[in-house]
Image (tube, rainbow, N blue to C red):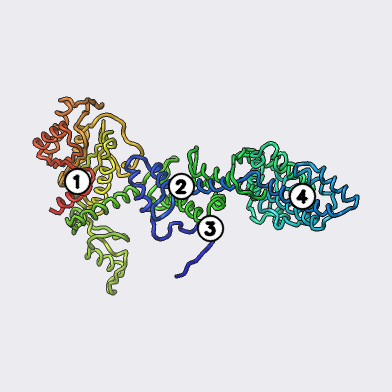
Amino acid sequence: MRIRYSRWDGSQDPFGPDIHAADLLEEMSEDLLTGLGAEGALSRMLRRGMQGRFTGLDALRSRLREARRRQHEALDLQGPLEEIRRHLDGILERERTTLSFKAEDDARLREAFLDALPPDVPGQIRELSGYRFADPQGQQDFDDLMEYLREQVMGAHFRNMAQGLKGLATEDLARFRDMLAELNSMIEARDRSEPLDFDGFMDRCGDFFPENPRSLDELLAGMARRMAAMSRLLASLTPEQRAELQALSEQILADMDLAFEVDRLGANLAGLFPEMGWGEPEPADGEGAMPLSATVDVMERLHDFEDLDRALRGDYAGASLEDVDEEALGRALDEEAVSDLRRLKAVERALEKAGLLTRREGHLEVTPKGARKLGERALVRVFEQLRRDREGIHEARDAGGLAEPTGSTRPWRFGDAGQIAVQRTVFNAVVRGGVGDRVRLQPDDFELIEAEQRTEAATALLLDLSFSMPLRGHFVHAKRMALALHALIEGRYPHDRLYMIGFSDYARRMEPRDLTAAGWERVYGTNMQHAFNLAGRLLSQHPRATRQVIMVTDGEPTAHLEGERSAFSWPPVAKTIRLTLAEAIRLARAGVTLNVFMLEDSPGLVRFMERLARLTSGRIFLMDDREIGEFIVRDYVTRRAG
C-alpha cells in the first residue's frame, strides 16, 4: 500500500472518497425536519461530529479542557525563582567551603562579602557580577548560570525568535537590539499611516524569525502572545515574587543593553493587541517546577486554550469556524485536531458546493436540490424496510402517463428522447445533399414526433402543521414521508403530479424545501376546510387524471374560513364540522379519492373521521407515525400498478 503525504494547501478533500455532501445532509436530516433549520442543524452536526467520519467541536473542546487541566497541574509559579535560587545557593555554598580552607585575610573579607549579600536573587546576582570567585569551578558555575539566565529571560520574552540565543556574541546582541529598534519604529510609523517596508525588514532580519511570518501583523501577533504571557506570569505571582522576578528580568536585559527596546516593544504590542489579556493573573497551585521560559510556555498555552475554547464555542455575534486558529490548535493539541478542524470547516463549503445548501441574505437554507436529496434518502430507507418486510416493489415500465402525438414534428436537440420522425429526417438529408447523391444522415437532419405528455395521476398531500404535531412528536415522521413521496413521484412517475399543502389556521401551497425551514407554527387551528378547498382547486386542473387526497393529521378540525379570515374554536363547533365535511363531499363528488391518516385516536377525531368516511367513501387509517412513510409509499406504488 502506498501513502503520499503533502503539506495542506486547501485544495485537498478533507473527507476523502468515503463521505459525500449527501451523507452530511442526511446526518442533519433529523434536526432539519424537527424545525431547527439549516443553520441550527449544521451547528448541531458540527458540535457532535459524525460517528466514524470526523470529530465534532464538543470532542475538541473536551480535549482542550483535559489539556488545560494537565497544564494547570504542572504549573508551579514559584518554580523559576526557586530553580535559580537553588543554583545560586549551590554556587555560594561551594565558594564558602573553598574559603573556609584559606587562612588569608582576603578569604575573611570574601566571607564577609558573601554574608552581606542581599536576601533576594536579583540583588545577589547584581553584587556577584563583579565578584571574583576563589573557587575556579564556582566561577565557571556562576558564569554558566548567568548565561542560562540570559537564555531564559530572552526565551521568556521572545519564543522561537533568535536562533541560538544562547551564547550570542556582543555583535549579535547589538544586531538583535537594532532589529527591535527598527521593529518599534515600524509599529509607530504605521500608527502615523506612513508607508512600511516589511519585505526589506525581513531581508535584513529574517534569520531572527524561524517561523517566517508572512506579514507584519502575523509577526507582531506571535511576539505579542509571548510578551502577554510573560505579563500574566508576573501578575500571577505574589507581590514579593513579582518584584523579584521583574527585577531579575530587567537586570539581565539591561546587562544585554536590550531593556529599553524590550519595554518599548511591550508597550507597543499591548496597545495593538489589548485582547490578549495583558497582566491578567492565572491561578495555579501545581507542583511541576519548570524553568522560566518553560513556565511562560505554559502561560501562553493556557491563554491559547481560552481563546480556542471561545472560538470553538462560537457563542458570540458573527462567530465562525474561520475564527479558530489552526496553528494555535496544533500547538495546544496535535495535528489530528487540526485535521478534524479542517474537516469541520469544509462541511458547509461541501454542502454549498454540492448545491444542497445556500446562503440567502446571510441565512443558511436548504436548496430545492437539497430537499430532493433528503427525499431520495428517505425513500431509500422506506424501500429497504419494504424489502425487509418481503413486500416487494412494483417497478413501473413507463414513467407516468403515455405521450400523445400532436401530429407535428420538431428538430432533435442533444439530450432529447422520443420517437424519430423517419420520413421527415430522411427528407431533410435529401434536401441538404441534393438529388442523385447518396443519402448521408447528420445530427441536424433528425426530427422527433412531437408529443404531449398526459398527467396520469394527481395527488394533493395535506400535511397538518398545527402546533400539536411537533408537540406530540409526529412532525419528523410526517415530513420525512412527504419528502419520500415527492422523491418517489419525481423519480419514478415524473408525469404524475404532486401538490403539497400545509394547513394550520390557514392552508397554503408548499415546496419540499419548506419542510426544512426553521421553527414551526405556534398558532391555534386545524383548518381542514381550507385545505380541502385548496386541494380541490389544484386537482381540478387535471380532469383526466386519477386524483386523490392524502391527509396526515393528529387532530379534528378546529377552524374554518369566514370570508378571508380563519375562525378558531376549541372544542370544535358544529359550523366548523359542517363546512369541513361539505368541502370533503365536494371533493368526493368530483371523483377525488380521500385517504386520511390519523396519528392520534382521540374520541373526537375518531367520530369525525367515521362521518367523513361514510359521506365520502374515503379510506381512514389509524397509523403509528413511524410507519406512515412506509405505508403511504407502498400504497401509492400498489395503486399506480393496479
Q: Residue at x 46, y 57 (%)?
A: 14
Q: Amino acid at mark 1?
A: Ala
Q: Amino acid at mark 3?
A: Asp
Q: Which residue is mark 4?
A: 177
Marks 1 and 4, how far apart in space?
83 Å
Choose between 383 and 435: the one closer to the eye: 383
Quarter in which the N terminus is drawn: bottom left
The image position of residue 379, as x and y in percent, is 26, 52
The image position of residue 16, as x and y in percent, is 43, 59
Q: Secondary structure at mark 2?
A: helix
Q: Which residue is mark 2?
A: 57
Q: Are marks 2 and 4 in contact (CB under 8 Å)?
A: no
Sequence-wise, which precedes: disc 1 or disc 3? 3
Pair 1/4: label in front? 4
Q: Amino acid at mark 2?
A: Leu
Marks 2 and 4, how far apart in space?
43 Å
Choose between 571 and 94: the one closer to the eye: 94
Q: Secondary structure at mark 3?
A: loop
Q: Which residue is mark 3?
A: 9
Q: Amino acid at mark 4?
A: Arg
Pair 1/2: label in front? 2
Quadrant of the image occupied by residue 305: top right
The image position of residue 410, as x and y in percent, is 26, 57
